């Protein structure tokens, strides 16, 4: 407010008026410049060169300087500038390298005054001296800057930047003799106009071309309360940065840096606002931004009128901060009023929300919002304790309204322990690399051990659905039996036998077992050989024993199996057991006698055999084929596809519950079987959430595994982006290009192993104390024998 | 052989080296493995280039440290030392940048999957019937797990790549016809659509391989030994003689003819260089006095542009496209030539309104990070490369000549520099040179050894390779400018 009042006094009551408006030009503009009376603007481009009068609510074309039947290239302007002392004097830079001056006071239609054809290449910029009437400076693509005295026919002095392409030249506003020039190679040079032989100072400002620069208009400015004369220079470059340099110090010092979203084509300090500057970009982005250099992330104001890139900006009056003029490639000339500017801060989301590692929730918002919310106290009863902070206001903060925010933190009680299952689960789950059945078993086991019974059941169910059902019981039995049910013992055995069979017998046995009852008995028999040697011989010998085995045992067998479900009931849900029972019974019907045989033998030797078998149960792969063959009937009745809808709902359910871990793990484990049934986006969403969680817990390995296993393209490409690591040479400190182990500049190998003195091309491990190191294995070996550095520097190396 | 041990991959290297050191006279060992009954492939060509005598080209093993590092890099990246590298090593500074860029485009982070990149390379090279590059990339394509079926023709590739065919065609022959509708068609094709980043990657690859095809033909690169047409299993000669034993090392018959022809006109060609230098000097001096009217200057560009359309070699010998290459074409008739025949109008593209440094770079770097930087460096090195020599003269400022060549190529594509006087081109580039440039840039498959030999007769081979570098970079930039301008227009 204080500033505003100062403006009116500066303008001496002659306050500018106007509104946001635009007018259509006939052709794209390349540059604009304002007359010092703030009432006229000149627009120049490849095929336009006109003066417009700025009236209350419109632009009025006043003069067309592009005259002549066949316009020459001299009129194709790259830049235009209006003298700030003389209302009649203009200069343009032509794309063909000619500098033209124009005198509006000439009576004829052609206002062209003088022609300087000294530059060999396109002239990028022209600039009048701020106080001297006849001094004009130009900067060209050919790398030269020329100073012209308008009273003479040719240049007074030529400055060579010793480099390609001058992109901008600007006279210092306060220092009579100084001007700045910017170059395509990223350098900025400061020159004394009296010394054309060499520049006063040079520094590298940007990476890539520096497109523009602007001296700060105020005579006294500086940082940290230190006020100095004529100090600040703003530069903008192709590297999307605007930098503010304090050039009063012996070494140019970067005071501020604003990161924009596109290369910066023009930069202009805002009058009367010490820290504001306007920028527009060369490509892609069409808006004009006004930045407060102290707040480099969010522009203070934004003008969005243009539909194509803005090529020229100018503040209408050197002491009025509210009017900005702009020309654009979309062939419009605009006047922007600062009060009509859109303010991104208003649209910006002033709330911040973040989860802590252990489930704490921090939440910052505008004070007003929080005050209203806290009236309702929604979180009070929820075992959580909101804590409120209030930030102290910073007087320098320009966005005072937003600065007053409140931060709330919600803590979950005993959160540390309650969340530990997540970490455990993440680390212990197996997601790939084994058959699905084993994955499910493993994961179910993990879940059960962590006390998450529902999840464990889910895994078990998945296994039943997607794997050959015959195997399910064995696993379940394994669990139940393992917990010490004595009655399950015989059952165990019956399975053990089967699983052993393939090991002993051949495939033909399996084939036969399909329809042939006898073969099955053989099978059982043969497995029994494990237990007793005599039987072994029998089996090998003939099928005869099978006959006597086909005895009256049928009833017994059934009893046995019926018994089992009852017994395991408390631990296993019903749906598992019936399934396990059915297939078994099928088999029993086929080959009833086996069981009796078993029971007979089960008495003594099985106690010991059982333990060993229990361990070997799950991983025996071959048992798969055997069992599934005998249960082909069952499979055909209920294909896994039948359940896919159910599984999908289940996954959604878990995701809804917030357990994306389960959803993602199942998704990965099941892979193709279920992926097609689930919405691509939902999958992606789960993946990202899960990966995010994993990374918060610093489970990098797990998260990478998940990324790797994910089938969603958007996810798997996460690990493909920015995978390169740049290193510098340890000798000359230059970045190493090309190969990582040999420096292209000093031709030395950068990372030598201190033990074997060879180049390390793979894993390099080094001591952070003395920075010597080498091959991982070599260092490990060395440290077994000695704790001193292998390089002989005497350091007691420490490796973690 | 040092290379082989250094790079640790004996098999391929020994192949490469034996290829390089074909026989004693020209370098290496005769094959003694004959008795073992192993069929050993023998290089057909003599050295990496058909145009440049082998002895002019650097021998592996005699390189200096910098070149050695370059070779090692190249070998490590590709697992081979191809003939292009061996010819380009005349200009190690450029080669380094070239290899870095190519490596990044093909093997580093990027939006396109690896096999797509090679396939696009094949598509682009096939437009110019460049069997050398096609063969090279067919191998690479299969190596990175590409589907061999795709190689039976573009129609077997995914729809997405098929869509790119049109852009490839236009870009290769008439880039000025690219409109934002082309871009839109690619970006909005339902499930086959390209993303902007992918498209930029594809465009960079296409332009890279179009211009590389120009280089391959322009320097007469010989096929690699492991590719079709690069080797023979026949015994070297009847009685264990290498051809060069008989001809005293001067085994290239064409070469001899040309040399004898050259001897006759040696004074002529000597004056050629002198005259060129004289002209450059004149232009340098009288630049200020020269007061060509604006209209005249303006019309010069148009004249040059029109003329560049007509410059064509009279001998229209058709190069029969290699069998396996042609399948990648749909429309062989679509070329630069029939275009000029119809005398269509090339619209003028003004560099001052859309140039690589300001606009193209920003766009590429935005959509395909780091590549803009790499290509920018490559352009800079190619444009600014000079040893300040011309034929036998030293300390010559060749910037004017280089700029004339660069701008002449852009002129053929309708790209105009406001600040350039196109009259200079006529003064500096004679007709045979123009024919060569035009052929290399527009219809590289028609380049003949005669064309290569007939321009700049007194100049060194390294200088001719230098010219080729300028040609390919200027061509690449021209194509990129048109493609990127269309993308920019699409985005706004």
Image (spheres, rainbow, N blue to C red):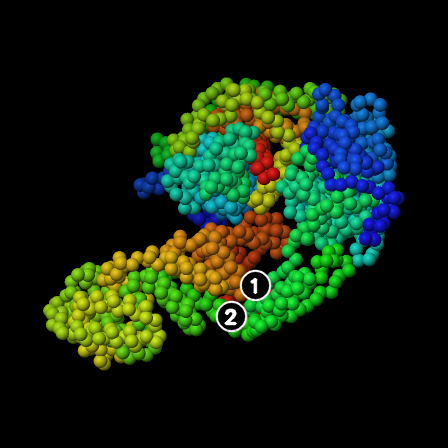
Residue B187 placement (x, y as % from top left): 51, 40
- What residue appears at the point 58 percent right and 20 percent down from the top-left corner? B307
Locate the C terminus of chain A and report the quarter of the image it occupies: bottom right
The extreme bottom residue here reads A604
Q: Secondary structure at mark 1?
A: strand
Horizontal side of residue A224 vs A295, given as left or right: right
In the image, which is nearer the foreground, mark 2 or mark 1? Answer: 2
Gap between marks 2 and 1 measured at Cα: 36 Å
Q: Secondary structure at mark 2?
A: loop
Label 1: chain letter: A
Can residue A210 be seen from the camera position used here? no
For residue B224, which quarter of the picture?
top left
Name the residue carrying label 1. Answer: A766
Name the residue carrying label 2. Answer: A419
- Considering depth in this image, is B171 or A639 the residue closer to the camera? A639
Label 2: chain letter: A
- Considering depth in this image, is A399 or A32 the residue closer to the camera? A399
- What residue appears at the point 30 percent right and 78 percent down from the top-left corner? A485
- Considering depth in this image, is A168 or A265 the residue closer to the camera? A265
Residue A20 placement (x, y as % from top left): 73, 41
In primary-sequence order, the first of circles 2 and 1 is: 2
């Amino acid at each position: 407010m204080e500033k505003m009042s100062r403006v009116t006094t500066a303008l001496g009551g002659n306050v500018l008026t106007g509104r946001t408006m635009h007018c259509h030009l006939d052709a794209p503009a390349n540059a604009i410049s304002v007359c010092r009376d703030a009432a006229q603007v000149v627009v120049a481009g490849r095929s336009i060169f006109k003066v417009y009068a700025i009236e209350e609510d419109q632009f009025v074309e006043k003069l067309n300087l592009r005259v002549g039947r066949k316009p020459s290239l001299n009129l194709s302007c790259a830049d235009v500038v209006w003298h700030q002392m003389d209302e009649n004097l203009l200069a343009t830079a032509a794309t063909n390298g000619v500098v033209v001056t124009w005198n509006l006071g000439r009576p004829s239609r052609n206002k062209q005054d003088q022609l300087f054809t000294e530059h060999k290449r396109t002239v990028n910029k022209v600039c009048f001296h701020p106080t001297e009437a006849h001094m004009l400076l130009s900067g060209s693509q050919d790398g030269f800057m020329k100073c012209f005295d308008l009273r003479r026919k040719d240049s007074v002095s030529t400055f060579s930047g010793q480099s390609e392409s001058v992109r901008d030249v600007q006279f210092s506003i306060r220092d009579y003799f100084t001007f700045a020039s910017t170059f395509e190679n990223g350098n900025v040079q400061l020159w004394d106009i009296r010394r054309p032989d060499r520049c006063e100072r040079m520094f590298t400002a940007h990476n890539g071309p520096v497109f523009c620069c602007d001296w700060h208009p105020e005579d006294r400015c500086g940082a940290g309360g230190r006020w100095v004369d004529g100090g600040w220079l703003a530069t903008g470059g192709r590297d999307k940065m605007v930098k503010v340099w304090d050039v009063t110090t012996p070494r140019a010092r970067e005071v501020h840096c604003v990161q924009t979203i596109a290369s910066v084509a023009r930069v202009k300090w805002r009058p009367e606002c010490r820290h504001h500057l306007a920028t527009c970009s060369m490509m892609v982005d069409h808006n004009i931004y006004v930045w407060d250099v102290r707040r480099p992330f969010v522009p203070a104001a934004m003008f969005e009128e243009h539909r194509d890139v803005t090529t020229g900006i100018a503040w209408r009056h050197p002491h009025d901060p509210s009017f900005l003029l702009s020309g654009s490639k979309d062939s419009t000339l605009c006047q922007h009023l600062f009060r009509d500017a859109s303010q991104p801060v208003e649209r910006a989301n002033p709330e911040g929300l973040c989860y802590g590692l252990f489930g704490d929730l921090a939440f910052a918002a505008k004070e007003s919002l929080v005050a209203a919310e806290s009236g309702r106290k929604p979180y009070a009863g929820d075992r959580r304790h909101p804590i409120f902070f209030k930030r102290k206001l910073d007087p320098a903060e320009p966005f005072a309204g937003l600065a007053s925010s409140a931060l709330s933190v919600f803590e979950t009680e005993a959160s540390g322990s309650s969340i530990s299952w997540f970490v455990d689960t993440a680390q212990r789950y197996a997601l790939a690399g084994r058959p699905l059945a084993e994955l499910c078993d493993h994961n179910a086991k993990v879940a059960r051990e962590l006390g998450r019974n529902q999840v464990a059941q889910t895994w078990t169910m998945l296994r039943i659905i997607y794997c050959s059902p015959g195997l399910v019981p064995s696993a379940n039995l394994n669990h139940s039996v393992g917990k010490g049910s004595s009655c399950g013992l015989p059952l165990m055995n019956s399975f053990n036998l089967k699983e052993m069979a393939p090991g002993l017998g051949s495939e033909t046995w399996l084939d036969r077992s399909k329809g042939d009852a006898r073969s099955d008995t053989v099978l059982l028999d043969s497995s029994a050989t494990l237990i007793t040697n005599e039987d072994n011989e029998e089996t090998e010998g003939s099928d005869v024993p099978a006959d006597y085995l086909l005895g009256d045992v049928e009833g017994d067998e059934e009893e046995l199996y019926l018994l089992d479900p009852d017994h395991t009931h408390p631990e296993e849900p019903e749906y598992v057991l019936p399934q396990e029972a059915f297939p078994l019974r099928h088999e029993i019907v086929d080959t009833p006698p086996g069981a009796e045989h078993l029971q007979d033998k089960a008495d003594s030797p099985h106690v010991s055999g059982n333990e060993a078998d229990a361990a070997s149960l799950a991983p025996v792969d071959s048992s798969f084929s055997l069992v599934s063959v005998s249960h082909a009937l069952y499979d055909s009745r209920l294909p896994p596809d039948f359940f896919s809808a159910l599984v999908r709902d289940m996954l959604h359910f878990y995701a809804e519950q917030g357990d994306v871990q389960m959803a993602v793990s199942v998704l990965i484990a099941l892979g193709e079987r279920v992926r097609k049934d689930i919405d691509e986006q939902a999958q992606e969403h789960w993946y990202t959430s899960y990966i995010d969680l994993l990374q918060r817990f610093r489970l990098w390995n797990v998260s990478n595994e998940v990324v790797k296993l994910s089938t969603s393209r958007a996810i798997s490409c996460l690990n493909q982006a920015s995978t390169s690591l740049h290193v510098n040479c340890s000798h000359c400190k230059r970045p190493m290009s090309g190969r990582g182990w040999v420096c292209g500049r000093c031709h030395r190998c950068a990372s030598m192993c201190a033990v074997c003195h060879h180049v390390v091309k793979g894993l390099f491990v080094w001591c952070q104390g003395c920075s010597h190191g080498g091959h991982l294995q070599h260092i490990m070996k060395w440290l077994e024998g000695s704790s001193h550095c292998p390089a002989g520097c005497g350091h007691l190396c420490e490796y973690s | 052989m040092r290379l082989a041990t250094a790079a640790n991959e004996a098999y391929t290297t020994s192949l490469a080296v034996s290829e390089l050191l074909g026989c004693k006279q020209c370098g290496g060992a005769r094959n003694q493995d004959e008795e073992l009954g192993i069929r050993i492939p023998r290089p057909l060509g003599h050295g990496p280039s058909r145009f440049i005598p082998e002895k002019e080209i650097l021998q592996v093993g005699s390189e200096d440290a910098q070149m050695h590092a370059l070779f090692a890099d190249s070998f490590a990246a590709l697992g081979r030392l191809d003939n292009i590298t061996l010819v380009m090593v005349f200009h190690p500074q450029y080669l380094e940048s070239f290899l870095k860029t190519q490596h990044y485009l093909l093997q580093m982070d990027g939006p396109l999957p690896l096999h797509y990149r090679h396939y696009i390379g094949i598509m682009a090279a096939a437009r110019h019937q460049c069997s050398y590059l096609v063969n090279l990339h067919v191998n690479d394509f299969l190596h990175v797990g590409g589907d061999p079926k795709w190689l039976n023709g573009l129609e077997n590739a995914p729809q997405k790549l098929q869509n790119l065919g049109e852009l490839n065609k236009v870009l290769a022959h008439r880039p000025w016809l690219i409109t934002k509708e082309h871009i839109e068609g690619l970006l909005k094709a339902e499930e086959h659509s390209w993303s902007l980043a992918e498209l930029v990657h594809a465009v960079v690859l296409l332009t890279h391989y179009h211009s590389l095809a120009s280089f391959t033909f322009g320097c007469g690169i010989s096929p690699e030994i492991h590719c079709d047409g690069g080797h023979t299993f026949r015994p070297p000669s009847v009685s264990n003689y290498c051809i060069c034993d008989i001809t005293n090392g001067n085994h290239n018959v064409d070469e001899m003819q040309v040399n004898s022809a050259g001897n006759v006109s040696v004074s002529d060609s000597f004056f050629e260089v002198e005259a060129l230098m004289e002209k450059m000097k004149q232009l340098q001096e009288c630049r200020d006095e020269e007061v060509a009217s604006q209209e005249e200057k303006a019309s010069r560009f148009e004249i040059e542009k029109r003329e560049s359309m007509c410059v064509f070699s009279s001998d229209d010998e058709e190069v029969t496209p290699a069998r396996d290459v042609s399948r990648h074409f749909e429309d062989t008739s679509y070329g630069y030539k029939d275009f000029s025949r119809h005398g269509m109008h090339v619209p003028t593209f003004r560099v001052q309104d859309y140039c690589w440094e300001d606009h193209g770079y920003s766009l590429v770097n935005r959509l395909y990070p780091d590549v803009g930087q790499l290509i920018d460096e490559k352009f800079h090195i190619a444009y600014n490369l000079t040893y300040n020599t011309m034929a036998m003269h030293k300390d010559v400022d060749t910037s004017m000549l280089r700029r004339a060549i660069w701008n002449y190529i852009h002129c053929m594509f309708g790209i105009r520099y406001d600040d350039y006087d196109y009259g200079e081109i006529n003064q500096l580039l004679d007709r045979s040179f123009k024919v060569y440039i035009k052929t290399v840039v527009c219809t590289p498959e028609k380049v003949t050894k005669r064309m290569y030999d007939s321009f700049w007769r007194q100049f060194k081979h390294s200088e001719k390779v230098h010219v080729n570098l300028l040609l390919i970079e200027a061509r690449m930039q021209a194509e990129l400018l048109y493609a990127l301008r269309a993308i920019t227009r699409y985005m706004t």
